[in-house]
Image (cartoon, grey):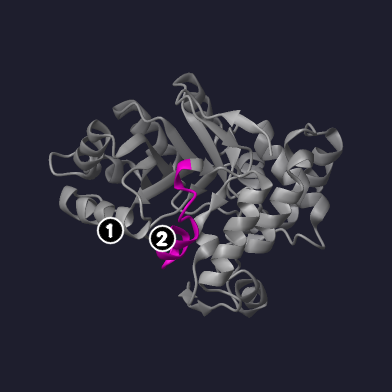
């Protein structure tokens, strides 16, 4: 696994990173999983480490993933980059959440700490109020408890506002083929992030489309219970999946977090060279253009505002 510059942080990050939602067990999104638990988390983290992955990302919203991942990372903390998030918008709640995350992850610092899921401009304004979460983030940064800070979002408007208000060092955003091809989603925030020297983590790049209402998509909801959108099938749609991933790389991301499904995570790891070292081709674009009309009615665009 090759390493890449992570924006202006000075960190070197693997081309594929480990998304902690893979470690979630029991119930998530209303479904119960098989083959989950601490042993499964330990196995998947060992696989990631053996593959050369050095960046592990998790969040309190991912069920009990912090507990699972924290246990799996015992003994390797100094070898890795550990990223966590807070979905809290006020200072007091954010402080409690950060303390709990540190405890569950068995660490005294976050290498990257992110405001999670900024939804709209009002959401951004809230965290910058006098009792907002950014007060806590700044305290963590000054104390060294958060070495670098960033945010995650599905909203281009929220991202642009956040970048105007603060010198965040990283952003995790959807680098998704059909959102970009259909409505130009992502171009403005990617451009601005690069201008500011921010690291860009691409997510949702393995998504084919959003779930359609009705029973027809229940099979996909059961197949990928840790995901809230329809993925390209890694077996039957591998060519489209690789094209979509190369499309994300061509957008200018610095690293890629695969979908929360462990099989898709392994697919990304096993095809890292085909994703990163093979440029997006006209054949890739032809595949994606031909497929776009079949999914335009179900664009994956949650919390999206222009």
Q: Residue furthest front?
A: 75
Identified at 53% across, 51% down, the residue is 301
The residue range painted magenta reads: 62-78
- Per the image, the residue denoted by label 2 is 66
**Residue at x 13% of width, y 39% of height:** 130
**Image disc number at residue 119:** none
Q: Residue furthest left?
A: 130
Instruction: For mark 2, give the secondary structure.
Output: helix
Mark 2 neighbour class, 10 Å CA radius: few under 14, some 14 to 19, many 20 or more = many
Taking the image as shown, residue 79 lies to the left or right of residue 248, namely left
Q: CA distance from mark 1 to mark 2?
A: 9 Å
Question: Is 57 a magenta residue?
Answer: no
In-image side of 24 versus 144 (left or right)? right
Displayed quadrant of residue 182: top right
Q: Which mark is residue 100?
A: 1
Point out the tag, 1 or 2, that comes first from the N-terminus: 2
282 shown above or below 240: above
Looking at the image, the residue that sits furthest to the top is 195
Q: Give the position of the C terminus as an image quadrant.
A: top left
Question: Tags 1 and 2 in contact by the CB under 8 Å rule?
Answer: yes
Is residue 118 visible in the rendered image? The answer is: no
Residue 241: percent from left, percent from top: 75, 51
Question: Where is the N terminus found, in terms of image quarters?
Answer: top right
């Amino acid at each position: 696994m090759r390493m890449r510059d992570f924006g202006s942080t000075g960190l070197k990050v693997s081309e594929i990173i480990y998304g902690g939602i893979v470690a979630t067990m029991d119930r998530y999104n209303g479904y119960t999983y098989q083959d989950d638990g601490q042993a499964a988390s330990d196995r998947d983290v060992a696989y990631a480490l053996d593959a050369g992955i050095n960046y592990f990302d998790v969040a309190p919203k991912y069920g009990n993933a912090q507990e699972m991942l924290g246990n799996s990372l015992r003994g390797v903390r100094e070898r890795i980059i550990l990223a966590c998030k807070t979905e809290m918008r006020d200072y007091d709640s954010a402080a409690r959440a950060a303390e709990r995350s540190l405890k569950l992850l068995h660490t005294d610092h976050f290498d990257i700490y992110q405001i999670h899921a900024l939804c709209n401009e009002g959401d951004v304004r809230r965290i910058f109020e006098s009792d907002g979460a950014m007060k806590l983030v700044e305290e963590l940064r000054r104390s060294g408890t958060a070495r670098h800070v960033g945010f995650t979002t599905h909203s281009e408007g929220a991202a642009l506002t956040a970048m105007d208000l603060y010198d965040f060092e990283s952003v995790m955003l959807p680098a998704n083929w059909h959102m970009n091809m259909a409505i130009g989603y992502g171009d403005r925030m990617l451009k601005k992030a690069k201008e500011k020297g921010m690291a860009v983590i691409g997510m949702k790049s393995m998504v084919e489309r959003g779930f359609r209402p009705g029973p027809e998509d229940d099979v996909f909801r059961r197949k990928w219970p840790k995901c809230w959108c329809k993925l390209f099938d890694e077996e039957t749609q591998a060519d489209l999946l690789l094209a979509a991933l190369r499309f994300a790389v061509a957008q200018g991301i610095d690293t890629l977090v695969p979908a929360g499904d462990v099989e898709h995570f392994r697919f990304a790891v096993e095809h890292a060279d085909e994703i990163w070292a093979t440029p997006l081709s006209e054949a890739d674009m032809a595949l994606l253009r031909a497929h776009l009309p079949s999914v335009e009615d179900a664009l994956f665009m949650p919390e999206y505002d222009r």
